[in-house]
């Protein structure tokens, strides 16, 4: 059966499928482009399911802001090459549009959200897997809300490898953005000392006391206690946001910077792409040989 070249071109542009696959789809559908697209999608989805068990440890976080809501989500792929690909970035943005329009705050709800064509995000993922050739996963979807008078600070590092969202009361967008950049660089574990959990303090105190006793045998108990207190204070300055020296100006703490700008931290989050996903170690030579078989 002769295939219209223009139909073939349109189908390929619409689906991203290979030329031979498009030709076969048009053959199967009697040159009906809508049926051909549906046929390709069905076949593409079948291929995508097989790829869905592969490890996806690369990818990015993205943030979509709509007035007083910030939607944060992570999309993973298998290789850094794909995560920097223009098509991947475009797909990440499209997923964000659906998540924001659907106003969802968790991954399960996000996957069931539908775009303007009635396609769920889950279906979008499967279709994109067929186009890109790698397993693509959506995870870690959450929403941050603020009051109208509060300010968002948004910062994405290295194309979204790290994403930070903070909310401040008072101050301005510059202050909020600087705070987000600081959080990205310093990765504070707690807002301030009042937020440090008792279990962490007890464990660190015990470890520091053992270290002090071993390195200072014979020292009086009260001296050891003061040494432990000093070392613990130093450690807390490193892990508590308000005590950390500001990255932009190490001469002032974050607490002082916010005070000078009449600002107060309401909340913050820092997300690292691929965190918790075990990367597969592989032998490159063996991988190439396997593909050549």
Image (cartoon, rainbow, N blue to C red):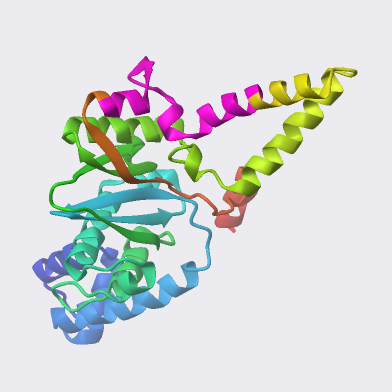
- Is any part of residue 283 visible from this angle? no
In the depicted view, which residue is nearer to us: 3 or 231? 231
Which residue, as the protein is rendered here, is positioned at the far top? 251
Q: Position of residue 285 (x, y in %)?
A: 63, 44
Magenta-highlighted residues = 230-259
Residue 104: x and y in percent read 27, 68
**Relative to residue 115, is residue 106 drawn left or right?**
right
Q: State the image quarter where residue 36 is shown.
A: bottom left
Query: Which residue sits at x=37%, y=55%?
Result: 74
Residue 273's place in the image compared with 3, above or below, is above
The spot of residue 263 in percent (x, y) is 24, 34
Query: Number of labelled discs?
Result: 0
Q: Image check: 125 left or right of 134?
A: left
Say whether residue 287 is left or right of residue 32.
Answer: right
Up the image or down, 130 lies above or below 91; here it is below
Q: Is residue 256 magenta?
A: yes
Q: Nearer the viewer, residue 62 or 58?
A: 62
Query: Could you tell me which quadrant the N terminus lies in?
Result: bottom left
User: Which of 279 and 127 lies nearest the eye of the viewer?
Assistant: 279
Closer to us: 123 or 31:
123
Residue 236 visible within the image: yes
Q: Residue furthest front?
A: 222
Which residue occupies 79% across, 27% down? 211
């Amino acid at each position: 059966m002769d295939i219209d070249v223009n139909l073939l071109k349109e189908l390929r542009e619409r689906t991203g499928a290979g030329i031979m696959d498009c030709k076969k789809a048009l053959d199967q559908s009697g040159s009906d482009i809508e049926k051909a697209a549906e046929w390709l999608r069905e076949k593409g989805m079948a291929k995508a399911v097989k790829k869905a068990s592969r490890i996806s440890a690369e990818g990015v976080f993205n943030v979509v802001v709509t007035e007083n809501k910030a939607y944060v989500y992570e999309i993973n792929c298998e290789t850094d090459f794909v995560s920097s690909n223009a098509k991947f970035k475009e797909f990440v943005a499209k997923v964000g549009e659906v998540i924001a329009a659907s106003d969802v705050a968790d991954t399960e709800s996000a996957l069931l959200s539908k775009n303007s064509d009635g396609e769920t995000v889950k279906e979008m993922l499967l279709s994109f897997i067929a186009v890109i050739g790698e397993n693509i996963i959506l995870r870690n979807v959450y929403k941050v809300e603020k009051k109208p008078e509060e300010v968002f600070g948004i910062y994405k590092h290295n194309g979204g490898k790290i994403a930070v969202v903070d909310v401040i009361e008072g101050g301005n967008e510059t202050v909020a953005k600087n705070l987000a950049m600081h959080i990205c660089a310093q990765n504070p574990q707690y807002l301030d000392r009042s937020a440090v959990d008792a279990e962490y303090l007890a464990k660190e105190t015990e470890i520091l006391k053992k270290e002090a006793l071993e390195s200072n045998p014979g020292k009086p108990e009260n001296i050891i206690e003061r040494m432990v207190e000093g070392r613990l204070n130093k450690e807390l300055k490193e892990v508590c946001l308000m005590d950390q020296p500001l990255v932009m100006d190490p001469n002032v703490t974050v607490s002082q910077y916010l005070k000078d700008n009449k600002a107060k931290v309401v909340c913050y989050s820092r997300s690292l792409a691929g965190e918790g996903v075990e990367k597969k170690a592989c032998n490159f030579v063996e991988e190439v040989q396997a593909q050549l078989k």
